[in-house]
Amino acid sequence: MVEPHNKTIELHTENLVLKPLGLKYLETVNEYALDYENTKYMCRLPNMNTEETVEFLKIVDEEWGKDEPAFYEFAVLYHGRQIGAVSVYFEDKIGELGWIINRNFWGKGFATEAAKVVITHFSKQGFRHFIAHCDTENTASRRVMEKLGMTRTGIHGGRKNRSAETESFEYQYELIV
Ligand SMILES: CC(C)(COP(=O)(O)OP(=O)(O)OC[C@H]1O[C@@H](n2cnc3c(N)ncnc32)[C@H](O)[C@@H]1OP(=O)(O)O)[C@@H](O)C(=O)NCCC(=O)NCCS
């Protein structure tokens, strides 16, 4: 069987479908990427304007087009609507996980459900080591890591969330599958 091109990857869970993120999701990505509440614990967000989102999504599209992407940004779809993203960035075969869900859809287990299927997908391809970081104040993200079975392996200072005026601390969690 011919291996499907990366851009056709589709992962399914009970409630969600994950597809390659890209420019076609600009409007729904902006709903959370430009929102302070939705991004206050994030290093690369919020975006200042839609142009910043466009630039990011173009890079994401381009990466999906490569034979061996260095990172994967998945759109998380719920009833066909894009409600967030889960990402994995690889370095030395270690996958750094990330997630964001539109705040109108928080607290329904969606980040955990989406991250789980991403981990399963890449573990089947031989990637066994995953890592994630979150601000020590970001209880929701920390809970996602714990629900994924990840173990806390560090706490570091020097985190600078984009909208914060001061540096903060972050937890590091890891998972070997
Ligand atoms: C982190 C995030 C993706 C989680 O998405 P989600 O779909 O709501 O996550 P889940 O529903 O799978 O799990 C969230 C858990 O955090 C808990 N939680 C959420 N806010 C909380 C709070 N303020 N205090 C305590 N627990 C909290 C929920 O109760 C749930 O845990 P439980 O299942 O044990 O009850 C979402 O909050 C988000 O988009 N945050 C902004 C972006 C971000 O910070 N991303 C991570 C950067 S490191």
Image (cartoon, rainbow, N blue to C red):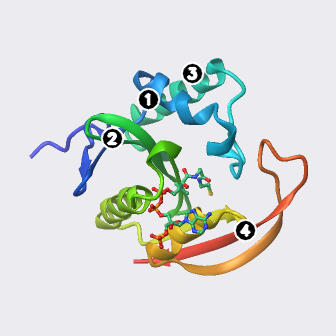
Helix, strand or loop at label 1? It is loop
The response on whether ligand 1 sits within 8 Å of label 1 is: no
Residue type for callout 4: Thr
Q: Which of marks 2 and 4 is nearer the N terminus?
A: 2
Would you say the residues marked 3 and 2 are in contact, meaning their CB atoms lie under 8 Å apart? no
Is 93 placed above or below 34 here? below
Residue type for callout 3: Val
Near mark 1 (Cα within 10 A), the count class, few <14, some 14-19 or many ≥20, is many
Would you say the residues marked 1 and 3 are in contact, meaning their CB atoms lie under 8 Å apart? no
The residue labelled by disc 3 is 54
Q: Residue at x 39, y 56 (%)?
A: 110
The residue labelled by disc 2 is 77
Near mark 2 (Cα within 10 A), the count class, few <14, some 14-19 or many ≥20, is some
On the picture, is 160 further left or further right than 116?
Answer: right
Which percent across, then down, holds residue 69? 45, 43
Query: For the residues marked 1 and 3, what is the alpha-carbon distance in whole angstroms?
Result: 9 Å
Query: For the residues marked 4 and 1, what is the alpha-carbon distance in whole angstroms?
Result: 30 Å
Instruction: Give the foreground label among 2 and 1.
Output: 2
Q: Which of marks 4 and 3 is nearer the N terminus?
A: 3
Q: Which of marks 3 and 2 is nearer the N terminus?
A: 3
The residue labelled by disc 1 is 22
The residue labelled by disc 4 is 136
